[in-house]
Image (tube, rainbow, N blue to C red):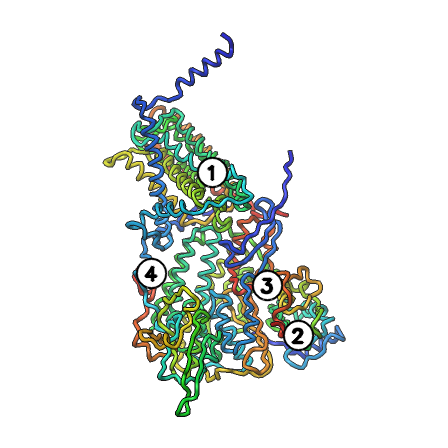
């Protein structure tokens, strides 16, 4: 250790921290202030379109975690009726492969992310919950939904 | 671009020095006798023109009848690479010579193979389990481990 | 009259003088000032904890505590309540008595120091004629508490932290005392009140810039502020000497730590920044403002600088600060000999020049060896 | 009087502020001096190699996210390159550019984390760490925009990338590049010349060049030791041969050199980004690859230059939909080989700094 630079380096560093002292904070006060997440957010839920789903179970086959559970019965017009559609979001890793795999665009990643539960059992989304209204699909792999979602907040755009 | 050296050519060079070492050199890799692995390693590292100073990775693959251990050597000086394979027959009491003396990068990788595949490397200074705890039973990376 | 009697009466004569001359000669004086000292320390601790947490947060581009009370000012109180409700855990191998005693030994001296700090001309608990000596002596006591804590916890991290602290404090005591000695020479008195009064013309920071720097650096090391916070060293020793402490005992250490910071800021403010002196504002407010300025500088350095290594810490004390402090003392003494009476003001630039020259010279000569030991 | 002393054992970790996860070092100390060190791995072992054998080739990609979780993109890339090599799949031009852009952004993000936590290990109380994280947030924003998550991206696919970038991506990236360049310069003023940091890191933890090669070190650790070896130049994958950039190297291989190499690499990454942004063509981003791809029987090894070093995947195929064997070359694990040699004789504080200068990620060490 030598003080070859007579503490100039320390002084420079002190100047940088002082400059940052007066910069605008970038942290937000979460429950009150919210940033808009990306349109393609892979939230921790799935949104399922009952009308489009044919029960082909491609999503269940693709899921690396095996959390999608589908039971079907043969329907009238050479198709399947989905008897049961369950997603255990507790084991879901939100990889989005099921959404990519779905050949009929019937499965969407959810836009919501505040879905913590107190019991593990409550994390299993049943068919009724999946069908329920008010769940916003994100535009992950569904670019046609881009317009329906607000623009993402970017840190770079926030004033310093 | 790292050039992959011709396996036949290198196998010929090895055979000149170590007659029984090479078993097969038809594919992209040279299959060597496990007994002469250490000699082959020393040859590869110390021969001028080859100078394999960098042992990139060691993989062990379980093929039920035998275990295949794949070594990927790179020479940083000449920017060329070579794959050496060796086999351990059977499933119990598998041993291979350790390359730690030549390339210390074999240290953690051989320990890992010992841990997960159950191949003991003779001459390794610290042949202990690395990712599992010391009294763990079995070798989980084997195909028959459930 | 035997020799024993003589010694006894001699001792009695000293005892007569034991309650020192109270300012104002009122018997209730000690009672009032005891309360004031304790209250002042506790309130100041809450204030500096707030300043530190918000300051560090602002330096680090964060917001800091802002939920309890307006702007989070009640955070320290909320923390105190939380910590009081926590379970007190004593390690089974701990040396129980020492373990229990250590927090008190750390915290008590910080309040005692304020006995000799003037809040206004003469407004102090005891105008000791050896005030500076008292400050130095008492401020070193908390080291013993730290070592007690480290030793008794039977935790290796704690012990390492405590050992580091003892080593650091013993080493840094030298430059600190020597730099204070320069002030004492200038003021011609050891009483803090007289020292403050002597700064009526100019604060001693301009007469003794080097002394101020040395005291600031040494003080930071003594109270284990970054970059010398080796006894806690959260990235190495998790929490250093108080790793095993919890609940109220931990709170005592926490209070003690910030209490020491308040004490060191107060000493620096009193000795070098003119204490309570200042225009317009009431004197006690000036003191608080100056304490906060010094403390803010400490927060600033803490937010900026990495931590030094233990051997560098010691080398810095003995090879850099100590010689400079000695030279500073010598120069001060020579100046006082050269200009008897009040020093002329034109020596202020001279002092700054000497300071700059000495720091440059010291930096050139200062060198620590490599940290590696052959094993 | 001679005092009888004896060395004592200090367990550093697995739960410790500076072990970058759950690493454990069993250090024998003589006072402050480290006499011996025994690294203990495995606290984060999840058996990813075994798990990969039971998943489809596409389903392994989310697993690779969880290796080096501060640099998921490059792990993704290494894996998909291997499978593409195995199956002989060619990737559309635009996808190659997107892969390069993502890897370089990822490199900057990961180096910011590494450097920040390295400063934190040196004892700079969280300030540089949070500055670095603040800049990393910009990049996380971009990743969020592209693939919907900020940490585990799962963006690369066999035969391309999962989806094309949205329209607002490029303008944002063009604004972020100069911003980050300015900030790197600013943070260089902060601690580059700081006397205390120099004293703590210069000459500390020297890894000589020959030893670095011998232990199989890679990435900034190898380059910090003065070896000019970067997979992007030595064995260009993807389209790295089209870009102009330098390989920064250190001089003597101490902690300071490793830190400087990381900083300079960020600058070079910004250069690559600028070129890639200028050159990127329009077009498809994903080759037509079946969901359940069955590569021919054989094996392949492909490697990329990840922020920590050379991440390689050795995939053996038996013709089924799942890899027969998927071995991961973890640079963090290899870099730690010489940890003991570098630390013995130094103080316990240096141990933290030297260990921090490797910038390992436990997810990759233990897999």
Q: Identify the mark at residue B68; answer none if there is no mark.
A: 2
Q: Nearer the viewer, mark 1 or mark 2?
A: 2
Q: Nearer the viewer, mark 3 or mark 1?
A: 3
Question: Do the residues marked 4 and 3 share a common chain?
Answer: no
Residue sitting at x 61%, y 62%: B130
Q: What is the spatial separation of the Cα atoms under label 2 and label 3, in whole angstroms? A: 21 Å
Q: What is the spatial separation of the Cα atoms under label 3 and label 1, in whole angstroms? A: 49 Å
Considering only vertical position in the picture, is A73 above or below C88? below
**Subunit that carries the residue with mark 3:** B
Camera-side residue: B131 or C100? C100
State the SS at label 4: loop
Looking at marks 2 and 3 on the same chain, the residue that comes earlier in the sequence is marked by 2
Dot 3 corresponds to which residue?
B131
Dot 4 corresponds to which residue?
A30
On-image quarter of the C terminus of chain A = bottom left
Question: At which x and y percent is residue B68?
Answer: 66, 74
Q: Identify the mark at residue C321; answer none if there is no mark.
A: 1
Identify the residue at the far right of this view. Answer: B19
Considering only vertical position in the picture, is C121 above or below B139? above
Considering only vertical position in the picture, is A14 above or below B2? above
Q: Mark 4–mark 3 contact, CB under 8 Å?
A: no
Q: Nearer the viewer, mark 2 or mark 3?
A: 3
Q: Nearer the viewer, mark 4 or mark 2?
A: 4
Q: What is the spatial separation of the Cα atoms under label 4 and label 3, in whole angstroms? A: 39 Å
Q: Nearer the viewer, mark 4 or mark 1?
A: 4
Left/right placement of residue C129 relative to residue B78 reads: left
């Amino acid at each position: 250790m030598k003080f070859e630079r007579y503490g100039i380096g320390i002084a420079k560093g002190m100047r940088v921290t002082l400059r940052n002292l007066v910069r605008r904070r970038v942290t937000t006060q979460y429950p009150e202030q919210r940033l808009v997440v990306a349109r393609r957010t892979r939230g921790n839920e799935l949104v399922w379109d009952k009308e489009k789903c044919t029960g082909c179970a491609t999503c269940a086959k693709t899921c690396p975690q095996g959390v999608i559970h589908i039971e079907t019965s043969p329907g009238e017009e050479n198709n399947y009726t989905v008897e049961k559609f369950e997603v255990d979001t507790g084991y879901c890793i939100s990889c989005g492969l099921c959404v990519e795999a779905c050949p009929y665009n019937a499965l969407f990643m959810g836009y919501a992310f505040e879905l913590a539960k107190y019991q593990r059992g409550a994390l299993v989304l049943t068919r009724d919950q999946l069908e329920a209204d008010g769940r916003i699909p994100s535009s992950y792999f569904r670019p046609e939904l881009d317009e329906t979602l607000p623009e993402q907040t970017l840190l770079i755009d926030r004033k310093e | 671009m790292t050039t992959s050296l011709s396996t036949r050519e290198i196998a010929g060079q090895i055979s000149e020095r170590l007659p029984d070492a090479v078993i097969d050199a038809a594919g992209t890799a040279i299959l060597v006798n496990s007994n002469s692995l250490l000699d082959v390693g020393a040859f590869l590292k110390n021969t001028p023109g080859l100078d394999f100073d960098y042992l990139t990775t060691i993989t062990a693959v379980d093929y039920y009848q035998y275990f295949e251990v794949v070594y990927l050597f790179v020479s940083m000086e000449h920017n060329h690479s070579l794959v050496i394979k060796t086999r351990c027959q059977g499933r119990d009491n598998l041993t291979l010579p350790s390359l730690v003396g030549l390339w210390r990068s074999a240290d953690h990788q051989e320990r890992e193979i010992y841990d997960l595949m159950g191949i003991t490397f003779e001459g390794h200074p610290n042949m202990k389990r690395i990712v599992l705890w010391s009294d763990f039973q079995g070798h989980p990376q084997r195909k028959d481990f459930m | 009259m035997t020799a024993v009697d003589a010694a006894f009466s001699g001792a009695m004569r000293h005892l007569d003088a034991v309650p020192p001359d109270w300012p104002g000669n009122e018997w209730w004086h000690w009672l009032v000032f005891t309360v004031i000292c304790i209250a002042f320390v506790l309130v100041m601790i809450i204030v500096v904890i707030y300043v530190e947490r918000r300051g560090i947060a602002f330096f680090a581009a964060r917001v800091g505590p802002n939920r309890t009370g307006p702007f989070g000012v009640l955070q320290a109180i909320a923390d105190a309540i939380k910590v009081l409700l926590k379970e007190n855990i004593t390690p089974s191998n701990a040396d129980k008595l020492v373990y229990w005693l250590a927090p008190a030994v750390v915290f008590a001296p910080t309040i005692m120091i304020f006995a000799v700090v003037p809040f206004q001309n003469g407004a102090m608990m005891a105008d000791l004629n050896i005030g500076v000596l008292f400050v130095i002596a008492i401020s070193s006591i908390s080291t013993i508490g730290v070592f007690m804590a480290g030793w008794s916890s039977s935790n290796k991290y704690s012990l390492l932290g405590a050992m580091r602290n003892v080593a650091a404090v013993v080493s840094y005591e030298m430059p600190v005392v020597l730099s204070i000695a320069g002030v004492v020479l200038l003021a011609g008195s050891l009483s803090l009140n007289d020292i403050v009064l002597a700064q009526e013309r100019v604060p001693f920071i301009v007469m003794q810039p080097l002394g101020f720097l040395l005291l600031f650096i040494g003080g930071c090391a003594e109270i284990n502020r970054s970059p010398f916070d080796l006894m806690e060293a959260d990235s190495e020793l998790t929490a250093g000497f108080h790793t095993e402490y919890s609940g109220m005992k931990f709170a005592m250490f926490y209070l003690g730590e910030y209490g020491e910071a308040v004490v060191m800021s107060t000493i620096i403010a009193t000795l070098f920044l003119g204490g309570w002196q200042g225009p317009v504002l009431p004197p006690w407010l000036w003191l608080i403002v100056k304490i906060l300025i010094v403390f803010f500088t400490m927060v600033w350095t803490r937010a900026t600088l990495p931590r030094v290594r233990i051997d560098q810490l010691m080398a810095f004390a003995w090879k850099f600060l100590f010689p400079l402090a000695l030279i500073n003392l010598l120069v001060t003494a020579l100046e006082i000999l050269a200009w008897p009476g009040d020093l002329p003001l034109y020596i202020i630039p001279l002092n700054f020049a000497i300071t700059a020259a000495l720091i440059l010279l010291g930096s050139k000569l200062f060198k620590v060896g490599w940290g590696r030991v052959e094993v | 009087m001679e005092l009888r002393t004896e060395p004592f054992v200090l367990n550093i970790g697995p739960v410790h502020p500076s072990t970058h996860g759950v690493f454990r070092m069993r250090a024998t100390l003589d006072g402050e001096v480290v006499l011996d060190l025994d690294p203990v791995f495995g606290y984060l072992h999840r058996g990813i190699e075994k798990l990969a054998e039971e998943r489809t080739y596409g389903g392994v990609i989310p697993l690779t996210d969880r290796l080096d979780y501060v640099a998921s993109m490059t792990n993704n890339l290494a894996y998909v390159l291997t499978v593409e090599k195995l199956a002989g799949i060619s990737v559309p031009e635009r996808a190659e550019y997107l892969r390069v852009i993502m890897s370089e952004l990822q490199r900057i993000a990961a180096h910011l984390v590494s450097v920040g936590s390295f400063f934190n290990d040196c004892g700079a109380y969280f300030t540089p760490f949070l500055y670095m994280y603040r800049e990393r947030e910009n990049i996380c924003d971009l990743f969020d925009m592209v693939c919907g998550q900020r940490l585990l991206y799962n963006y690369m696919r066999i035969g391309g990338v999962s989806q094309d970038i949205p329209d607002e991506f490029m303008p944002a990236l063009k604004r972020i590049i100069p911003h980050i360049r300015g900030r790197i310069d600013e943070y260089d003023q902060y601690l580059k010349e700081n006397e205390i940091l120099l004293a703590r890191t210069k000459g500390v933890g020297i890894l000589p060049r020959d030893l670095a090669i011998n232990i199989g070190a890679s990435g900034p650790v190898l380059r910090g030791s003065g070896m000019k070896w970067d997979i992007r130049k030595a064995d260009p994958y993807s389209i790295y041969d089209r870009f102009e950039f330098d390989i920064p190297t250190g001089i003597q291989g101490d902690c300071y050199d490793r830190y400087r190499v990381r900083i300079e690499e960020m600058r070079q990454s910004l250069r690559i980004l600028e070129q890639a942004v200028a050159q990127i063509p329009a077009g498809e981003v994903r080759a037509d690859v079946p969901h359940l791809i069955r590569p021919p029987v054989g094996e392949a090894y492909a490697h990329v230059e990840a922020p920590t070093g050379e991440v390689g995947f050795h995939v053996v195929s038996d013709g089924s939909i799942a890899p027969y064997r998927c071995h991961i070359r973890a640079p963090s694990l290899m870099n730690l080989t010489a940890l003991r040699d570098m630390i013995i004789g130094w103080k316990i504080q240096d141990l933290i700094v030297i260990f921090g200068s490797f910038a390992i990620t436990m997810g990759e060490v233990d897999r």
